[in-house]
Amino acid sequence: MSDGHLFNNILLGGRGGSNPGQLRVHSGGIAWRKAGGGKVVEVDKADIAGVSWMKVPRAYQFGVRVKDGLSYKFTGFREQDVSNLTSFIEKNIGVKPEEKQLSVSGRNWGDVEINGNMLTFLVASKQAFEISLADVAQSHLQGKNDVYLEFHVDDTTGANEKDSLMDLCFHIPNSNTQFVGDENHPPAQVFLDKILARADVGSSSEDAVVTFDGIAILTPRGRYSVELHLSFMRLQGQANDFKIQYSSVVRLFRLPKSNQPHTFVVVTLDPPIRKGQTMYPHVVIQFETESVVEGTLSISEELLATKFKGKLTEMSYKGLIHEEFTRILNALSGAKVTKPGSFRSCQDGYAVKSSLKAEDGLLYPLEKGFFFLPKPPTLILHDEIEYVEFERHGAGGSSVSSHYFDLLIKLKNDNEHLFGNIQRNEYHNLFDFISGKGLKILNLGDGRVTNGVAAVLHNDDDDAVDPHLERIKNAAGGEESDDEDEDFIAEKDDSGSPTDASEEEESDAVESGAEKEKPSKKDSKKEVVSKASTIKRKSKDGDDDSKKRKQKKKKDPRAPKRAMSGFMFFSNAERENLKKENPGMSFTDIGRAFGERWKKMSAEEKEPYEAMARADTKRYKEAMAGYKSGGPAINVDSGNESGSD
């Protein structure tokens, strides 16, 4: 990078644990971003009061002290990074890094150094530990010589660690020379006064700036009284009580529910709050959209004019409760507020109805991500997405399933999120929005609509067949579902008989080869339910498989054969070679093997087969035009025209 240095896998230390991320040191300051999204730390060049280096086990630690008293510690640098970064900081930022040494003697007596809000305990002029006085909640004397420090109990602190610092006690002997007192003012009292001057003492007992009573919170579920203090937010319920420092608040979301009198306000945390073994990275609050609230802020006019100038302009507030809550919390925490973007559903809403992990909810397409609410609240940033895929919903060719589709989002870390039960009329809006954001849509190719799911969803006819069946037809060579496909007749090498069960299994194998290797668990469950309902219906009607086969509707011999996909042209060309190389391979394994080969092929290798598919698609459209008009249609096998008898 021309302007600055970029370092990966750098740990940001703190009371919430160590988090890996990416650190950039440039001429304008420093910026650290947590890996996978989340917390961002930015320090401007003008705000840097000092920097330091320290050798820690297996790495070097880079300390940054800010003028307002805060301090950041970044760990994970190599020895060669120290000299390069030191010269860059001296030249571009104008601060000379100092070198600190870490004490490893194990002694617990030494000297105390207070610099801004940081307290450093030194043993033989080497640093033993360092704490931020801004984290001190209470401090008092114990006896005549002991000073007791109690730290803020933050429910986000320790979410990533098993242990968290709760209290600390210093013994100040009368013989010390650093804190000199007298008979009425002992050295311990002198030390305590310095602590009280810089610590955040008393904020837990002072009145809240504003309190909202009886607020419905969906995660963690319950009805709470929400108190907004100067440095933290408290959620007080009948069974639970959470205290959240504003430093843990990453972002606020205000998202209205579609066609409902409620609005979601989501407080995103990093690190998350913890209840037992359950982590809550998002606090989902539900307000009544038309509810109005008014009151007066418990804050001094001096603080209002200095610290919150431009954010809180008046002592009193009045307006819609979700807007006032977000505005005040934004001013106190400094977190940005995200509102709905340009997406609109077919009903002019900001979200589409969907389901995730058997939970119904709303999927909000935002300008920089997707947010599923209310449970489980799932935030997916565009930068995390590998590709998206529109899939069929359910199993079988029922008319109900053809009115819905699923949206699969594959992340770069190989995790997947399947949003199901999306109404079919939302497809166009979602497709246009996703493609407009530049996200990769699987199998979209060169911008043409795919022959499978998207082709069916583009069809405005409500009686169109199930998208999943369309994709299987394309992968299987385009045979109609009412006829038995020649490719599904088992040969001697394949072993087994062409029963209904084997045909269904082979259809899934073809799908997995062309689209994805393994079907999702959700789809498998739906298929099992579909099979079970089919068996019950058969037993009720008294029809067996043989009778049902006899009653199958015959295909019109004039109807042209459907167009084949490039994958199927490739499979047909290489099928015999694969069978010779692997005698005895089952049909399922053959389909899976072709799917793996197809995924590994480059675009140039696929082009001959894709060209054949485009030509076949053109042939099919021309044949269908003749077929629908009652004229001659192109014969499937010979390619000659044939009229009706």
Image (cartoon, rainbow, N blue to C red):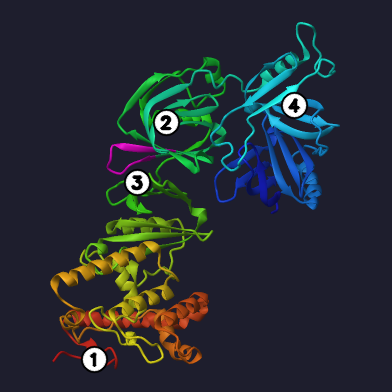
Residue 589 in percent (x, y) is at: 44, 80
Q: Amino acid at mark 1?
A: Glu
Numbered disc in front, either 3 or 2: 2
Q: Who comes first in sequence, dot 4 or dot 3?
A: 4
Q: Who comes first in sequence, dot 3 or dot 1?
A: 3
State the residue position of label 1: 641
**Badge 1: few (under 14), some or many (20 or more) residues near its Cα, within 10 Å?**
few
Q: How many tags in the picture?
A: 4
- Whether residue 610 is visible, yes or no, is no
Q: Secondary structure at mark 2?
A: loop
Query: Could you tell me which residue is drawn at 50 percent across and 76 percent down?
Result: 603
The span from disc 4 to disc 3 (Cα, nearest Å) is: 50 Å
Residue range highlighted in magenta:
255-266
Q: Secondary structure at mark 1?
A: strand
Residue 464 in percent (x, y) is at: 23, 68
Numbered disc in front, either 4 or 2: 2
Q: Secondary structure at mark 3?
A: loop
**Badge 4: few (under 14), some or many (20 or more) residues near its Cα, within 10 Å?**
few
The span from disc 3 to disc 2 (Cα, nearest Å) is: 34 Å
State the residue position of label 3: 350
The span from disc 4 to disc 2 (Cα, nearest Å) is: 41 Å
State the residue position of label 4: 115
**Residue 256 belongs to the span the image colors magenta:** yes
Query: Could you tell me which residue is drawn at 60 percent across and 46 percent down?
Result: 33
State the residue position of label 2: 239
Q: Who comes first in sequence, dot 1 or dot 4?
A: 4
Q: Residue furthest top?
A: 184
Q: Do the numbered discs 1 and 4 sit on residues whose CB atoms are within 8 Å?
A: no
Q: Who comes first in sequence, dot 4 or dot 2?
A: 4
Residue 509 in percent (x, y) is at: 39, 76
Q: Amino acid at mark 4?
A: Asn
Quick one: 415 or 463, which is closer to the camera? 415
